[in-house]
Image: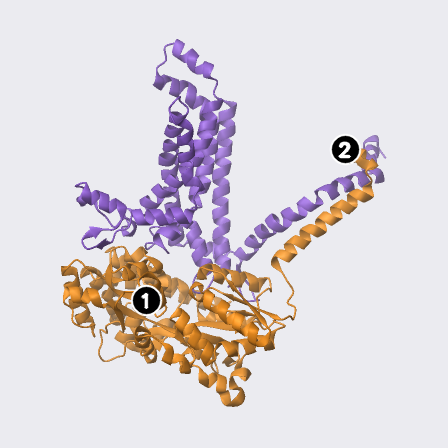
Chain colours: A orange, B purple
Amino acid sequence: MRICQLRGVGMKKLALISLVSVLLSFGFTHSGCAKAPKENNTITVWHWMTDRHDAFIKLAEKYEQQTGIKVKFDLYAPSEAYSQKIIAAAQARVLPDIYGILGEKKILASFIESGYVTDLTEEFKKDDASWENSLFPKALAVNIFAENNSYHIKPGIYGVPIDVTNIQMVYNQKLFKKAGVERAPVNFDEFLKSIEALNRVGIAGLVSGWGEMWMIDCFASNYAFNIMGEEKVMATFKGEVPYTDPDWIKVLNIFKTLADRKALMEGIVTKGNKYAEQDFALERAAFAFNGSWCVNVYWDMNPNLEYGAMLPPAVNPDLPMKIWGGAGSSFVVNSQSLNKTKTIKFLRWLTEQDQQVFLTEATQNLPSNRQALSAISKVLSQFAGAMDFTTHPTTWELNEQSPVIEAFDKGIQSIIIGEKTPEQVARDVQKVKERELQKVKDRERR
Amino acid sequence: MSEVSRARFKLFSFTDFRESFGNFLFVLPALLIFSIFYIYPFYKTFHLSFHEWNGISLKQFFVGFDNFKELMGDENWWIAVRNAGYITLIALTFQNALALALALACDREIKLKRFYRVVFFIPPVLSETVVGLIWSWILYSGTQGGQHIGLLNHLLDKTGLAYLVNDWLSDPKTALSCIAVVHSWKGFGWGFLLMLAGLQTIDRQLYEAARVDGAGPWSVFVHVTLPMMMPVFLMVMILTVLGAMQAFVLILVMVGQGLVYHTEVPVTRILAAMTGGYPKFGYACAMAVIFGLMLVAVSFTFQKLSSKVKQA
């Protein structure tokens, strides 16, 4: 039927219907993806921390009672999905008042450079820097850009740490007793001996979520710092030291030794950290390599678990074992938020002693406020005791390129499963490194 | 003005324009929605594939075909394509053979026919995450107190087949095959349903005529069932290929970020490029473009085959 036959209905009506449909379709698409920020009495926070969500909600209720300002915590998990969400929201200019940025420091730098993050330096320095001084310097470091930083970001403090964390090893005291291991090993040789004793009575050694590349990277980085020191690691990132250097071979050899001596739990290379946490909590392995957040996780899974925390056993006694740590989770303030003043006030309140004590007790995470340390448990205090040994890629002057990190971490997997030798992996990684350096040169030339 | 030109001019008279405009108004909402949700994302993917961009920065650098050139030389990408091809091959053979066998069984007058139909369709309706978690537990390789925790290893151990006990998901020889088998287990229900529907459309008189002519079950299957089912087979094959090539949730759940490069598929490579330590959106888009073209080529080939079969 041709449209002219519908003329009885009237072209005007038809045009009107079409126009309304078009407007509606625009309305739906627009309302679905872009809301203009309006100043109101509600602060919106986006986060990824499933274990802290309930505690945040309670704190939000308390804040509303005290100030009349509503704080809405929106949870988006897992963290990969959350990261995608904030990137998409940044592209659509619909970031909330408060959000967290995960990943390398250059991602935070990109957000700042693109104008999505408020510089909080002035707020932290107010009243003789009382806010800044109340927090652990290591916690703040992640959010600080120093003078002449390599990212070309205006020096300042750009985020608020709400807790601190570090990644160490934990050991099961009950399984130690069963195997006749008297104390937590203090060096790598002692560690291997304890593994032998555990294996003799059918107990698996070390478990960790090495199906997640960053966890392998973290473990390897600990030993790289211990074996060759920070300066040489950074020189490698700059391209001045090759991955085929004997010190890097030593780092890779750690994994070969662990695999050869059956120190690793079966299936470790494809295990997600959630599964690894389950294995340790259910006493299937005597050691785990995990972050301080594990205290809360293990408590949920097995409240009777008897365990302690220790630094990964050092190979080189002459250099300190450096572990990853610092700000566990940080929030930034959206520079386009119309609630900026209220938002900053709320974040300051959130990092005050009372709220930090509450968060620590409710979630078993290390507080970012120094005065809240009295509330922590024995295992957490062992984690806290190692804060002086922490370092983190987000605080380094530069980071390795992603393809090199991937080649390195995947290479470690292939060493563990016996596919490649440390020397082969070192050569492969160096090849990728040289290719990436060439790309940078080509880009600069263009 | 010639007669033809006059006729053409008449075609575009004001009245006709009004009519055409009316038609256009009718399709305008659909066209707009299609443009916003289909054409624009397609355009944007193509556009970004020629740029270097981290997904956050306001600056995007035009790099021409650099992303594509890099991709062509990216050994890991081609390993991922090969792995996806392997999963597809297992799906085309094992998954579809299983679907056909079960469809043939359910097409007969057997007891509890309806019950089986429901049971066979349970795996496809389960979430991939749930399926991945269940199979991860079945294939788990750890022990506790000398006992295997994973169901498969436990059964092998208890049935005197302890020599077959393996670290299924962390062994390069078995990891991808395990994923392919689980993918097939999850997907065979769709093929089963379509094939059963196809079998039920075959005229029963054809079977009777064949039997009267002395054909045995195998001859009936080869000379009646197979030719009549060819269009359905081709459709199932297209769906199987497209599904298998894009499988990735199972992989993420079962082996995390992968066992070296043995379990990588194109979608996991795209995801890794977009969500890695430092996102490479342009490169990820170049991968998406090439992968999309591969899938289009596969679909096109199958469609050509399908039309040839129909003609035959």
- Name the one closer to the observer, A30 or A315: A30
Residue drawn 28% across and 50% down? B140
Side of A197 relative to A414 (left or right) = left
Amino acid type, mark 1: Asn
- Name the one closer to the observer, B53 or B247: B247
Of all residues, the one furthest to the right in this rendering is: B1
Indicate the quadrant where residue A289 lies. bottom left
Number of marks in the rendered image: 2
Q: Position of residue A309 (x, y in %)?
A: 28, 72
- Tag 1 secondary structure: strand
Upstream in the sequence, badge 2 or badge 1? 2
Amino acid type, mark 2: Arg
Side of B167 relative to B213 (left or right) = left
Indicate the quadrant where residue B222 lies. top left
| Circle number at residue A290 | 1
Indicate the quadrant where residue A90 lies. bottom right
Q: In which quarter of the image is the N terminus of chain A?
A: top right
Residue drawn 33% across and 46% down? B135
